Image (tube, helix red, strand yellow):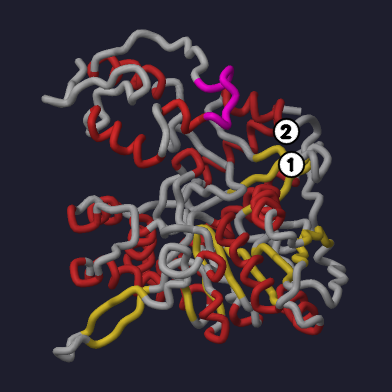
């Protein structure tokens, strides 16, 4: 079942060989002439011939029906979230998603993944972004927030770059307790700009005068809560900025980073009404102090008054590479995740202050119940003696990978193997989605798996 565009000639050798390219042979020839070349192959002259058109051992084409059936068979091999208890976190969390979110974000008015360019035709979406920014400021205790980034990792990397611009320094210090994935992304961002990256112990960061910022995670990658106030104060003494990646769910019961004086606060919006979805797409959260607003990356929706005195919403302070000279751009992120920013906005509005507090308290109390029960098992212990929110590390009597394989046979999705950092360590996460029966089933299973 293939379709050919009527009256579109199929190009000869040296031209595009596709039914779906709308340009005609004459139009292709005109473009090649303007480029001063004879055929399309000359555009790829820098690529060695042996790598240009590799043979692809592809199966024969299928009809739409056959493709749907094949994809269905592949999907049936997956373990669907909810088919059994899950205790996996480490950045993607199984939280309750109110049904109102899908009902609203699938409305025709909102079916777009991007920020609108035409304010006069997009007042609704711009207002949603404005409300999103306001809610993120309230959540993190900060003064300004942007329209969102790609995800938590890119938000944190952009924050590190922003700190370098503000301080005019070229070294960033990363606490060794932040996510390894976040560290990798920050290194990738910094290497092309000759920004040095240093890994430090948050119990004694020892920052130098050349350090632009100290990057922290709250709670940290292992789920534990560090002394944010002392770390922020020590960072400011060295003239550096305090950058904090913060779990938004934890803000239902923990004091905000803004309260402790953080300069830039980022996070991943996934816990705010976004499904796990194999790790993405998500929406990055980004907030800062008012004094740094002109160095803030991404988009910013502002509220103003039109010529008739009515409230209107516009994109403002657009310091991005599409709008100004590239060398002056504060970010290379070309858009924001507007659809998931909408989902997060609906989540926060629907849950409200008390709802988010209840979710946080459920996560806290259930995780502490689970930790206490597991720690009482012979061979299991809690190697880190610090306060935690919803994640904690268990030291197992054998390989966590082997234990997880046995757990999955019992239809239980276990935690993340963090043995590289903590010998035989498993990072477990307990959210409001885990019932007491789920936790008791995990404990019973672990007691048999040694």
Segment colored magenta: 45-52
How crowded pointer 1 is (Cα within 10 Å; few <14, some 14-19, many 20+) is rated as: some
Coordinates of residue 334 in the picture (x, y in percent): 44, 58
Q: Which residue is mark 1?
A: 418
Query: Residue 254 in the image: x percent, y percent?
Result: 59, 72
Upstream in the sequence, badge 2 or badge 1?
A: 2
Find residue 337 and report its horizontal and vertical position in percent: 40, 56
Say which quadrant the C terminus sits in. Answer: top right
Q: Is residue 49 visible?
A: yes
Residue at 41% x, 20% y is: 74
CB under 8 Å between discs 2 and 1? yes
Foreground mark, 2 or 1, reads: 1
38 and 159: which is toward the camera:
38
Q: Is residue 16 left or right of residue 305?
A: right
In the structure shown, which secondary structural element does the residue marked by tag 1 occupy? loop
In this view, the residue farthest toward the bottom is 309
Q: Which residue is mark 2?
A: 400
């Amino acid at each position: 079942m293939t379709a050919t565009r009527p009256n579109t000639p199929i190009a000869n050798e040296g031209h595009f060989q596709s039914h779906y390219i709308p340009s005609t042979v004459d139009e292709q020839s005109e473009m090649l002439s303007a480029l001063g070349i004879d055929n399309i192959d000359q555009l790829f002259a820098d690529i060695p011939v042996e790598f240009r058109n590799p043979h692809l051992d592809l199966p024969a084409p299928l009809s739409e029906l056959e493709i749907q059936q094949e994809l269905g068979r592949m999907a049936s091999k997956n373990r669907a979230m909810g088919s059994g208890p899950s205790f996996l976190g480490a950045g993607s969390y199984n939280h309750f998603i109110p049904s109102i979110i899908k009902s609203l974000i699938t409305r025709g008015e909102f079916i777009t993944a991007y920020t609108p360019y035409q304010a006069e035709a997009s007042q609704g979406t711009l207002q949603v972004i404005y409300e999103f920014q306001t809610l993120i400021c309230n959540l993190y205790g900060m003064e300004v927030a942007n329209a969102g980034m790609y995800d938590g990792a890119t938000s944190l990397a952009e924050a590190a770059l922003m700190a370098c611009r503000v301080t005019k320094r070229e070294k960033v210090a990363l606490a060794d307790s932040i996510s390894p994935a976040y560290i990798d992304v920050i290194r990738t961002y910094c290497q092309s700009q000759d920004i040095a990256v240093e890994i430090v112990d948050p119990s004694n960061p020892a920052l130098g005068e050349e350090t632009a910022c100290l990057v922290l995670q709250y709670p940290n990658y292992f789920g534990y809560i560090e002394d944010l106030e002392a770390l922020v104060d020590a960072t400011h003494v060295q003239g550096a900025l305090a950058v904090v990646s913060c779990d938004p769910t934890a803000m239902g019961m923990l004091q905000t980073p803004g309260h402790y004086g953080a300069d830039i606060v980022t996070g991943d919006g996934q816990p705010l009404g976004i499904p796990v979805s194999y790790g993405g797409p998500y929406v990055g959260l980004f907030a800062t102090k008012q004094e740094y607003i002109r160095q803030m990356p991404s988009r910013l929706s502002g509220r103003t008054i039109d010529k008739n005195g009515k409230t209107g919403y516009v994109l403002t302070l657009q310091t991005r590479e599409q709008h100004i000279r590239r060398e002056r751009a504060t970010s290379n992120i070309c858009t924001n995740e507007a659809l998931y920013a909408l989902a997060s906005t609906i989540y926060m509005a629907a849950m409200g202050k008390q709802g988010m507090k209840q979710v946080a308290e459920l996560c806290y109390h259930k995780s502490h119940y689970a930790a206490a029960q597991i720690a009482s098992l012979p061979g299991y212990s809690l190697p880190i003696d610090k306060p935690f929110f919803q994640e904690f590390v268990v030291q197992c009597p054998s390989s966590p990978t082997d234990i997880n394989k046995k757990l999955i046979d019992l239809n239980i999705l276990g935690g993340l193997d963090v043995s590289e950092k903590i010998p035989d360590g498993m990072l477990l996460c307990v959210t409001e989605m885990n019932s007491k029966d789920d936790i008791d089933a995990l404990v019973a299973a672990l007691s048999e798996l040694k």
